[in-house]
Image (cartoon, grey):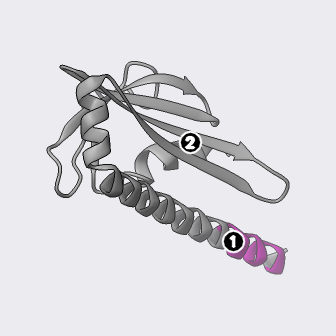
């Protein structure tokens, strides 16, 4: 489970983000996020619960864009919840104008994360089977 929090931050945004202050995933960490058709944006982690959730916010004149990432452990599976919200007049206008694109980006990130987590689970299962065969 420890690596899953890392994977949310670093796989959901594969090829789209870079750490700006090298502090790791914690409150105050800043990331530059570049996505197709949008200008690069700086997001700051405002909430972090290790291995459970983090929220990061892009602030600008007229509002903020808020992305929330949650890991919900379950029996035999882990659920990941991704959400995106806007706050403030200009952010709400931009959010409405780009809502389809935002939904598409969140869905793409969720699929990427699921694929990566499925691959990690397969690798772990394979490693366990090799280990039990050699024992």
Most common SS among magenta residues: helix
For label 1, the SS is helix
Q: Is 111 colored magenta in this rendering? A: no
Spatial CA distance of label 1 from label 2 is: 22 Å
Q: Earlier in the sequence, mark 1 or mark 2?
A: 2
Relative height, residue 75 to residue 29 (above, below): below
Question: Which residue is denoted by mark 1 in the rendering?
Answer: 127
Q: Which image quadrant is residue 87 in? A: top left
**Tags 1 and 2 in contact by the CB under 8 Å rule?**
no
Residue 32 visible somewhere in the drawing: no
Query: From this viewpoint, which residue is outermost toward the bottom?
Result: 133
Question: Which residue is denoted by mark 2 in the rendering?
Answer: 5
Question: Looking at the image, which is closer to me, 117 or 81?
Answer: 81
Q: Is 125 colored magenta in this rendering? A: yes
In the rendered image, residue 107, in percent from the top left (x then y), is placed at 46, 60
Task: Please give the range of residues in magenta.
Answer: 124-133
Query: Label 1 neighbourhood size at 10 Å, few (<14), some (14-19), many (20+)?
Result: few
Q: What is the number of the mark on residue 74?
A: none
In the rendered image, residue 135, in percent from the top left (x then y), is placed at 85, 74
Relative height, residue 77 to residue 27 (above, below): below
Question: Looking at the image, which is closer to me, 97 or 74?
Answer: 97
How many numbered circles does the render carry?
2
In the rendered image, residue 76, in percent from the top left (x then y), is placed at 82, 59
Relative height, residue 23 to residue 16 (above, below): above
Q: Looking at the image, which residue is at 70% across and 44% down?
A: 72
Which mark lies nearer to you, 1 or 2?
2
Relative height, residue 103 to residue 124 (above, below): above
In the rendered image, residue 47, in percent from the top left (x then y), is placed at 50, 22
Q: Looking at the image, which residue is at 50% across and 58% down?
A: 110
Residue 96 visible somewhere in the drawing: yes
């Amino acid at each position: 489970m420890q690596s899953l929090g890392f994977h949310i931050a670093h796989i959901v945004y594969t090829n789209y983000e870079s750490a700006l202050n090298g502090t790791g995933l914690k409150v105050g960490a800043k990331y530059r996020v570049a996505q197709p058709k949008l200008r690069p944006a700086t997001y700051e982690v405002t909430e972090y619960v290790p291995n459970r959730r983090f929220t990061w916010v892009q602030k600008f004149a007229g509002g903020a864009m808020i992305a929330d990432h949650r890991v919900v452990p379950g029996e035999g599976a882990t659920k990941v919840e991704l959400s995106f919200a806007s706050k403030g007049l200009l952010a709400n206008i931009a959010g409405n104008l780009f809502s389809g694109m935002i939904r598409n980006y969140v869905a793409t990130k969720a699929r990427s994360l699921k694929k990566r987590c499925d691959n990690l689970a397969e690798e772990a299962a394979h490693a366990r089977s090799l280990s039990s065969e050699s024992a």
